[in-house]
Every structure is written in C-alpha cells, then in structure tokens.
C-alpha cells in the first residue's frame, strides 16, 4: 500500500517553536493552523506564519529554517530577507507558508500586541485577527469556514466571560 | 482522549447546540491532540509540485491561484 504523506505533527510544532525561539525569530502563527492550535475543530495541511518584516528577522528565519532541515537556496533566502508578501514552501520537512503581509492585518506590531501564547510557548495571532484576515481574503475555502470560526470565537469569549464571573 | 458520545447527539440537538458541544469536546484536547486531529496531508495538484513559490505581492499570489489552480481547491475568490 502506498505510504500516506506525512502531516505536520506536534513534534514539528514543538521543534519550530523551539528553534525559532533559539534564533530570536519574531513571528505569529496565523490562518486556520492558528485557529486549530486554539482548539478549533477543523483540518488544514500547512502551518501559516506571519513574521515581522525586517532583514534581521529574515536572517534569523533563514538560520532557524536551515536548522529545522529546510533547503534554502539563494533565491529563497533573498525572498525571505526582503520579506516578500507570500512565500509558499513545500520542499521541507513540513509545509509552511510565510506571509509577510496577510490580508486584513494592517500592522505586525498591532497584531503582536494581541498575541496569545497558547500553552505558554506557541505565539498565535488573536482569533479576531485570524477571522478578519480570512474575511478579507474572501476565498471560497475561507468563506466555507468563516461561520463556524466565528461561532468558535463567540464560544471562547463566552467561556472566558463565564470563568471570570466564577 | 476518547471522543465517544458527541456524534450520538447529531440530529437530536439544534445546529447551534451541537456546534457548542463539538467546541466543548475540542477544548478538552491539548495542543498535541489538536495538531494530531487538525493536520493532514493530501496531495494538492500544482501547489505541491514545486519546492517553493515566491510572490512579491499578495495580490500576485491571489491572481496566480485564480489563474492556475483547479476551482475545486477553493482558492478562488468568491463574489
């Protein structure tokens, strides 16, 4: 039987967080991958990262990704250093999208102020930012998930409100 | 975590109540379990055929998706 392709695993997430922290990479996890880390019951294929755009942060990303086992050639390295809006990487140990300018999020700094460190170590953009970005992207696959995602955000807010009342 | 009961409620609860129950279950999972349930890998034609792609602007990427990818993949914009 043909072997199933390897999906992104919790070990990959752990390695990514650890290696990015070691190299001081400034980034947020966004997209459906971020929502799943919050506990949104759905599926995705790749992890989406929103890195801070600067040459220095780009250098850190390159160092960290090489350590994780990604083959970064000169063209890809230049694109990361320059912070090209969208870089889709499929040839590494796992699928990853680097999105330096996600839809619907005006500033990295502001998004970072709203970051949630899930389990204290995974920096995930706020669910509101993830929803805003998906709404703005307006693709068929975003539209399909938005209703459930908004209900999930509402559920988490009510749960939090309930907890603070206790 | 064994998730044995929730789907017995399918059809017996309103859509909102079922959704809430599903969220409750999902919240009981830790990140490790969320990743195990939430990430799967299937081949996506064209997207998976190159080791990487670079787009200067996000709008270039969106245009490329519209022009190149099969509609059923869902990357096209909706009106």
Image (spheres, coloured by chain):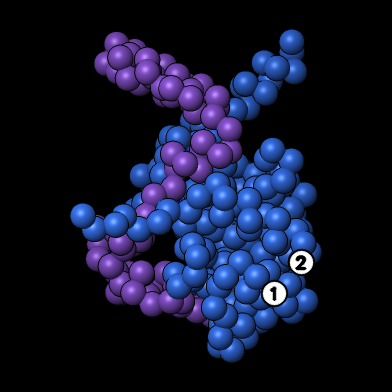
Chain colours: A blue, B purple
Q: What residue is drawn where x is 67% and y is 40%? A: A118
Q: Are marks 1 and 2 in contact (CB under 8 Å)?
A: yes
Q: In the displayed image of the protein, which residue is found farthest to the left? A: A1
Q: Quadrant of the C terminus of chain B?
A: bottom left
Instruction: Give the letter of the chain under mark 2.
Output: A
Q: Which residue is mark 1?
A: A63
Q: Is residue B11 above or below residue B40?
A: above
Q: Is residue A16 above or below residue A128?
A: below
- x and y percentages locating residue A127 in the rendered image: 60, 42
- x and y percentages locating residue B49 in the rendered image: 34, 74
Circle nearer the N terminus (1, 2) = 2
Instruction: Give the letter of the chain under mark 1.
Output: A
Answer left or right for A151 relative to B71: right
Q: Secondary structure at mark 1?
A: helix
Q: Secondary structure at mark 2?
A: loop
Q: What residue is drawn where x is 67% and y is 23%? A: A160
- x and y percentages locating residue B5 in the rendered image: 37, 15
Q: Is residue A16 above or below residue A83?
A: above
Disc ID at residue B73: none
Answer left or right for A68 relative to B50: right
Establish whether labels 1 and 2 are both on one chain. Answer: yes
Please identify the quarter of the rendering in which residue A162 is found.
top right
Q: Which residue is mark 2?
A: A23
Q: What residue is drawn where x is 59% and y is 28%? A: A156
Q: Is residue A102 above or below residue A37?
A: below
Viewer-side residue, A27 vs B58: A27
């Amino acid at each position: 039987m043909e072997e199933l392709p390897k999906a992104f695993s919790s070990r990959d997430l752990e390695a990514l967080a650890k290696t990015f922290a070691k190299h001081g990479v400034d980034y947020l996890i966004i997209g459906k991958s971020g929502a799943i880390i919050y506990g949104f019951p759905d599926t995705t294929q790749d992890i989406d990262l929103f890195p801070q755009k600067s040459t220095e942060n780009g250098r850190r990303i390159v160092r960290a990704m090489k350590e994780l086992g990604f083959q970064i050639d000169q063209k890809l390295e230049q694109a990361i250093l320059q912070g090209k809006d969208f870089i889709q990487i499929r040839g590494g140990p796992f699928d990853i999208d680097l999105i330096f300018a996600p839809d619907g999020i005006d500033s990295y700094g502001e998004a970072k102020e709203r970051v949630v460190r899930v389990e204290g170590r995974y920096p995930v953009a706020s669910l509101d930012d993830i929803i805003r970005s998906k709404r703005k992207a307006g693709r068929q696959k975003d539209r399909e998930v938005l209703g459930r995602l908004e209900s999930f955000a509402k559920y988490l807010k009510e749960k939090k409100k309930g907890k603070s009342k206790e | 975590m064994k998730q044995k009961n929730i789907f017995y409620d399918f059809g017996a609860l309103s859509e909102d109540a079922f959704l809430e129950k599903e969220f409750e279950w999902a919240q009981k999972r830790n990140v490790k379990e969320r990743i195990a349930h939430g990430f799967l890998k299937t081949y996506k034609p064209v997207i998976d055929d190159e080791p990487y792609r670079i787009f200067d602007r996000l709008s270039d990427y969106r245009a490329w998706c519209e022009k190149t990818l099969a509609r059923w993949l869902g990357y096209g914009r909706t009106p």
